[in-house]
Image (spheres, rainbow, N blue to C red):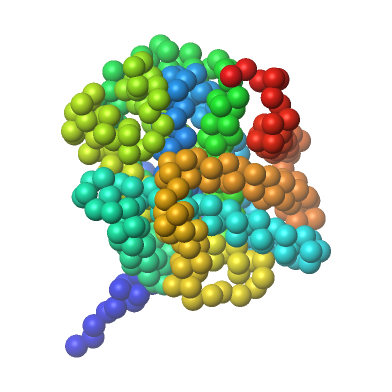
Amino acid sequence: MVIETSRDVGEQGSDRTTDAIRDVLAGRRHGHFSFLLFAGPAVISSIAYMDPGNFATNIQAGAKYGYTLLWVVLTANLVAMVFQGLSAKLGIVTNQNLAEISRDNFSKPVVWAMWIVGEIAAMATDLAEFLGGAIGLSLLFGIPLMAGMAITAVITYGILLFERGGFRAMELIIGAMVAIIGLCYLIEVFIAPIDWGGALKGMVTPSIPSADALTISVGIIGATVMPHAIYLHSGLTQARAPARDERERRALLRYSNREVVIALAIAGLVNMAMVMMASAAFHLGHSDVGEIETAYKTLTPLLGAGAAAVFLISLIASGISSSVVGTMAGQLIMQGFVGFNIPLLVRRLVTMIPAFVVVALGVDATNALVMSQVVLSLALPVPMIALVWFTGRKDIMGPYANGRVLQTVAIVGAVLVSLLNVVLLLQTFGALDGWLPG
């Protein structure tokens, strides 16, 4: 009798997916659902746009400023679509990920600096993810926060083991988590008394009413456009089914672009739903709600125990899945920049340590979540600028180099994020005192 291990089954599943993709590209397989074979990289990357850092910044945005900052969420999501699309294109065209191309084209000091910034971003990401998952477990089951973090660590490590069996198993697991988060917020939107007119106005009317709103806005950008997701997406497309000729490459790019738009549109809708739920529930009468724990406890009398439980389920799914994706990205960043891997358990421990230190020191968890997103936003220009630089070069991308319009849009996005970060730094050190309201 032959016993198949989970690794064997996972590898077979990935091999079957690769074979099926080849059949579609060769015209041997047709059907309305053939496009699902190409779904995976953008789905995995999209979980980074629905992590617990988003919960913290979106709750604060909705509670304090109602629907006013929805335009920031929308703008950040559109920028994310552009850069995730560019990252996917880089992997498909060059069969290298962003970290590898950076290592081959930049000087050693620049490569080491990029690696250090990438590692800091990975640690800030894990801080948000571990705290988010732990807070959800702590509130749902009434256990200490440190115990919630330990459970989150064990679950995420167990899920990461599936990656050894091939890419498809991980894509399906993360896809299921995305579906859970999306379903939870679909339920919340129907429960909360949302002012749809006010929400629409907030999406299309740019406004930064105070200095604190600016900090939250930069946090939203840091929680939406994620440095590690930009690195990771290029590696995920690189590893699935490499193009064997130009016809296959063009087809893979078409499917990739569609997946990016769909996956990140879903992530954007979830983020906007978070802000709208917080605005509807807290803005009038509970605008001081700024912590996830307070939001949960306040939701129960306002919208009912069911709404509060759904909120926690989505938070737990977000924390666990985004922690998995963060570890995958951290490993890719290290391998790409410095050329070696470390054991999965060691990688997991290195990026978890800051989160456990924060909890052990008694730092407010939600404030730590928001500040982690600010750190991410400060690290973000590095991969953004590198990605724009490489995808705009014909010697690297050939005929797939960014056209004038796309390159202009990408440059504007990178400059906008960089300028916001400069403003945040000036505000942090008091250089803008008296210049900004409130």
Residue 287, picture quadrant: top left
In what quadrant of the picture does the C terminus appear?
Answer: top right
Residue 418, picture quadrant: top right
Q: Residue at x 56, y 64 (%)?
A: 332
**In the image, is 415 to the left or to the right of 283?**
right
The number of discs equals 0
Q: Is residue 2 visible?
A: yes
**In the image, is 126 to the left or to the right of 162?**
right
Residue 247, picture quadrant: bottom right
**In the image, is 277 to the left or to the right of 209?**
left
Q: Position of residue 331 (x, y in %)?
A: 54, 66
Residue 411 against residue 339 in the figure, above or below = above
Residue 164 against residue 435 in the figure, above or below = below
Residue at the extreme top of the image, as rendered: 197
Residue at the extreme front of the image, as rendered: 361
Q: Residue at x 22, y 39 (%)?
A: 309
Q: Position of residue 212 (x, y in %)?
A: 56, 27
> In the image shown, does 89 or 115 lie closer to the viewer?
115
Q: Position of residue 181 (x, y in %)?
A: 33, 42
Q: Is residue 168 visible?
A: no
> In the image shown, does 85 or 65 lie closer to the viewer?
65
